[in-house]
Amino acid sequence: SLNGGSEVEDTMDIRDVILGTSIEGVAETKGMISLATIPSDQRVSIDIQLKGETTSKNVGYNRGVVIHNHGVTQINATKRVYFDSKGINSDPAEAKCTTDSTIDSIQAKSQMVQRMAWKRVGKTQGRANSIASRHAESRVEESVDEQAAEMLSEVSDVYQEQFRKPLIRRDGFPETLVAQTSDTELVLQVKQIGRFQV
């Protein structure tokens, strides 16, 4: 595991449809991004890990019924990045999210409709949380992939354009460039022999 980590904070508008209810709200995410080396004797393998929590306040609309709720989503996401002599690439991000929401109030045209809405919400709350969790996973995976793509693109361009391609053009790329990781360290072995060296 690489030392340190960086805190992240993000606020975003939420628009979703869950079990026929149109939902609008604001979600605030706080978390920590860290790096961990993954054992590999073929290349450098590093996991970018995001652990955090999203809190949201939402309003749902369904056939004249207005539902106010708040939720908490636990986030655990990972994106694996690889480096070898050819360059940098990565796997798509994978996220696991668990959402727990609480209904604050339900407004309806009549008390009878309001009571029916409370009963329906009570029966579907578990399914709604499960669907909200899957939707959160998709949003987190997309966000992690987008943010990592920008960073990795810059690093990859520097490696390709300022190191690999110029050396290949001059026939000076290392004869051996082996990149490896254990669970505690990153190892880079480079061997370069000049034309007149033993």
Image: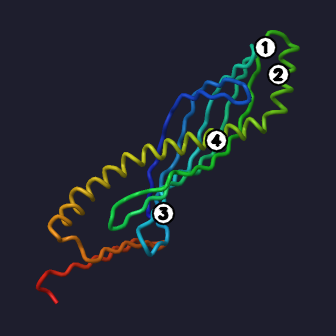
Identify which amino acid the numbered label 4 is placed on.
Thr
Tag 2's secondary structure?
helix
What residue is disc 2 on? 117
Q: Secondary structure at mark 3?
A: strand
Residue 92 in the image, given as x and y percentages of width and height: 50, 52
The answer to whether marks 2 and 1 mark residues whose Cβ atoms lie closer than 8 Å is yes
Q: Earlier in the sequence, mark 2 or mark 3?
A: 3
- Mark 3: few, some, or many residues within 10 Å (few <14, many ≥20)? some
* Residue 26 in picture, x, y percent from top left: 57, 28
As measured in the structure, the alpha-carbon distance from the residue carrying label 2 to the one carrying label 1 is 8 Å
> Residues under labels 1 and 3: Cα distance?
50 Å
Q: Relative to residue 23, is residue 137 depicted above or below?
A: below
| Picture colour scheme | rainbow
Label drawn at residue 36: 3
* Residue highlighted by disc 4: 73
Q: Spatial distance from mark 4 to mark 3, Cα to Cα?
A: 23 Å
Work out whether mark 4 precedes mark 1 in sequence or the reverse, and give the earlier one: 4
